Amino acid sequence: MELVSADASGRPHFTAYLSKYLQENVLPLKVTLKGVHPGSRDAGPCTIVIRLSWQHLGLNSPVSFEPGDLLGVMPENSHDMVSKLLKRLHLDSNFTSFVVQRLMIQKKTLTMAGPREEWVPYENLPPATIYEWFKKFLDITTPPTQLLLSEVSTYATNQTEKENLNLLSQDVGVYEQWKHSNRPTILSFLEAFPSLSIPPEAIISKIPLMKPRYYSVSSCLSMSLPTSVDLIVGVVKFTTEDGSSRNGLCSMYLNEAAVGTIVNAFFRREPGFHLPNDQSDPIILVAPDTAIYPFRSFWMHRKELMKVKQRLGTATLFGGNPTNREATIDTEGQTERQLSLKIGGIEVPIEYLSKADKYVTPDRVIVDDKTTKKIFHYKQVRAFKSSKLVFDASTTLLFLTLYIIILTLLFLVFQICFFYLL
């Protein structure tokens, strides 16, 4: 591989490139409102509310989404991390800021005259500066793969480092332990092996491309908010086993985005996480692990329907946030329990599911005995007639796993019975 200078006029618009790369209608949304969520505690994790608008685009056709849909956000790496990575690779910041380049790869083709090698553009990366590649196109927060470790080990001048790199690239157990303990980024990996002197083209093509992160929308289209969408995002921060600090890529990107920042994003339908078509159907909402934020768009939508006097079925919300049982959910300072009674016709105070007791079975919903007094039995659920159960992703996965286990057991019983009958 090699880097060649490219015509700056051939550089595609970033949003247009993302739309083609992702095969999605990517929109350059503008941050119009952002703040710390009232539910955040000083000593706990930070949760932010961010509003993204497309009003400035002046679109001819309206943008639409439904409660329960997802917003795919394309994050960007932090300027600080990119600058340190460029410095570690011994790249001049001015050069990488202004010179548009194209990554070329060698391609072998068979012709009538025999095999032929030619240099062709690396299609995964458009013409851009190296800084832009690291900032917008490559996920430099992801741990390096064993393939990358194997290929860059030849650039280590220190024999001990070369042996360690070979061990990591060849022994899956050692690699997984190293990755789990250190959660290395591309930068921290290069800093841990200072003798590595790698040309940028040797590592750029080995770093995975940036992927969108998906968040459930936390608002609904309404007369008051016809051209914007809200997200409620928990900012991820953690410390690795070796004491290093790490941040969630997308949550930190949104946390640092100031009002006026452009965020590239697109809507994605989530048909398995929608309200019933008949709004008069009673519903049960269960969120054992994710708190109740994914359901915010549901009760905001129901609130809009209540304004036009539409008949709504009863709604029961089971929420789970054991680390913060009285977290607030909106700027009015109401608690989750208060909101369950006041917003969008959500009735019945929220029951909390602890991490130890987050079981939802066909015959009953078990809740934490320390915080609730009721067990919601199947007979009570059946009284709702055609009640619709709406679960978050973790609960759906739990049901799917249980379903597969039951089918497997039934198959084994059938096989045993068939064997003895023979």
Image (spheres, rainbow, N blue to C red):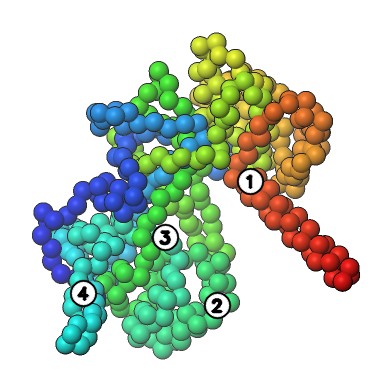
Q: Answer with the quarter of the image where residue 205 lies.
A: bottom left
Query: Which residue, given by chain and number where applicable, does mark 2 sit on?
Result: 172
Outermost residue on the front side: it is 422
Disc 4 to disc 2, how far (Cα)? 31 Å
| Spot occupied by residue 38 in the image (x, y as percentages of width and height) | 53, 30
| Spot occupied by residue 128 in the image (x, y as percentages of width and height) | 20, 58
Query: Which residue, given by chain and number where applicable, does mark 3 sit on?
Result: 141
First in sequence: mark 3 vs mark 4: 4
Categorize mark 3 by other alpha carbons within 10 Å: few (<14), some (14-19), many (20+).
Answer: many
User: Along the line of sight, which residue is nearer the eye, 237 or 24?
Assistant: 24
First in sequence: mark 3 vs mark 2: 3
Residue, x 87% and y 71% (percent of image)? Answer: 422
Disc 3 to disc 4, how far (Cα)? 24 Å
Query: Which residue, given by chain and number where applicable, does mark 1 sit on?
Result: 396
Q: Nearer the viewer, mark 3 or mark 1?
A: 1
From this view, report whether residue 130 is shown above or below residue 338.
Answer: below
Query: Which residue, given by chain and number where applicable, does mark 4 sit on?
Result: 2
